[in-house]
Image (tube, grey):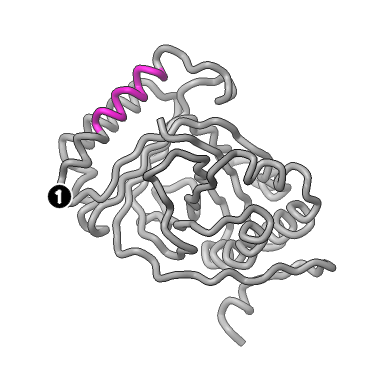
């Protein structure tokens, strides 16, 4: 019996989905900086302070891109917080429900470079600007633990950061892989980079999934109207003591 089969608790349903084929994780290091700035829903017009912050973040990310140890540095603006949390979070009222309407993702040449960059003046300037404006900030360095395929940042689209909370990270990884087939079959998803925080004690979330669709209509109808999203995806999350807090973004 594999370690995954011992960890994973499968929900019995009359519908099954094929397992996805994973590619090798990247050897990159990542910094993810997420912030709650506006209290209004993200599809409402942004406040002046948020607009100014996004401009500052984009300018500093452009400077970061010029470094030889930085592969990419991107600023995202939330467009929608869709359903998908499930019932598990009701049993964990201490968990912070992510409402991050601004997110930054920096990919570096290695995990060591990500840790070093986090202490350098250009990043501390970026972090300070975010903390000065935001009411809640989440900052991690991370590695890529599992991957469906590379996330294309060259063209705009709809990007997901899915902030997972789980009692057990290994169980979280197992159920993420098990349910990924639903997203591939039902939404056409062919890319995903799963980020594992370097220091779990410093993160509010066990893993963060990042992926992209061309359009909001590639993902939204499936999670709103397909019954198997609840009976298969959310039910398996619940059975494995895992909750997803998804937020959809566009490039700022």
**Residue 62 position in % (x across, y down):** 24, 34
* Residue 63 % position (x, y): 19, 35
Q: Quadrant of residue 33?
A: top left
Would residue 18 be found to the left or right of residue 204 on screen? right
Q: Residue at x 41, y 19 (%)?
A: 50
Magenta stretch in the rendered image: 50-60
Q: Residues within 10 Å of mark 1 (few under 14, many from 20)?
A: few
Magenta highlight: main SS: helix
For image coordinates 49% across by 33% down, the residue present is: 100
Nearest the viewer among 232 and 251 is 251
Helix, strand or loop for disc 1: loop
Indicate whether residue 53 is drawn in magenta: yes
Q: Please state, as top left, top right, bottom left or bottom right, where the C terminus lies in the image.
A: top left
Is 212 placed left or right of 69 in the picture?
right
Q: Is residue 206 magenta?
A: no
Position of residue 99 in the picture relative to residue 105 (left or right): right
Residue identifier under label 1 = 68
The outermost residue toward the right is 14
Q: Nearer the viewer, residue 110 or 87?
A: 110
Q: In this picture, is 208 found above or below 148?
A: above
Residue under the image location 37 percent in, 35 percent down = 75
Q: Quadrant of the N terminus?
A: bottom right
């Amino acid at each position: 019996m594999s370690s995954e089969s011992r960890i994973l608790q499968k929900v019995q349903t009359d519908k099954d989905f094929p397992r996805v084929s994973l590619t090798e994780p990247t050897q990159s290091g990542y910094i993810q900086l997420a912030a709650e700035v506006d209290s209004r829903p993200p599809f409402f017009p942004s406040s002046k302070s948020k607009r100014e912050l996004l401009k500052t973040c984009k300018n500093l990310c452009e400077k970061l891109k010029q470094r030889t140890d930085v592969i990419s540095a991107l600023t995202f603006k939330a467009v929608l917080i869709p359903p998908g949390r499930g019932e598990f979070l009701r049993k964990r009222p201490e968990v912070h429900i992510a409402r991050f309407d601004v997110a930054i993702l920096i990919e570096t040449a290695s995990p060591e470079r990500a840790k070093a960059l986090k202490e350098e003046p250009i990043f501390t300037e970026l972090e300070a600007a975010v903390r000065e404006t935001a009411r809640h900030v989440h900052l991690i360095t991370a590695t890529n633990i599992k991957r469906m395929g590379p996330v294309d940042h060259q063209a705009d689209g709809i990007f997901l950061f899915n902030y997972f909370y789980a009692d057990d990270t290994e169980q979280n990884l197992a159920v993420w892989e098990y349910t990924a087939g639903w997203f591939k079959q039902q939404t056409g998803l062919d890319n995903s980079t799963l980020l594992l925080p370097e220091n779990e004690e410093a993160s509010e979330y066990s893993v963060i999934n990042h992926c992209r669709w061309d359009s909001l209509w590639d993902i939204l109808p499936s999670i709103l109207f397909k019954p198997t999203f609840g009976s298969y995806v959310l039910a398996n999350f619940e059975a494995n003591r895992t909750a997803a807090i998804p937020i959809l973004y566009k490039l700022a």
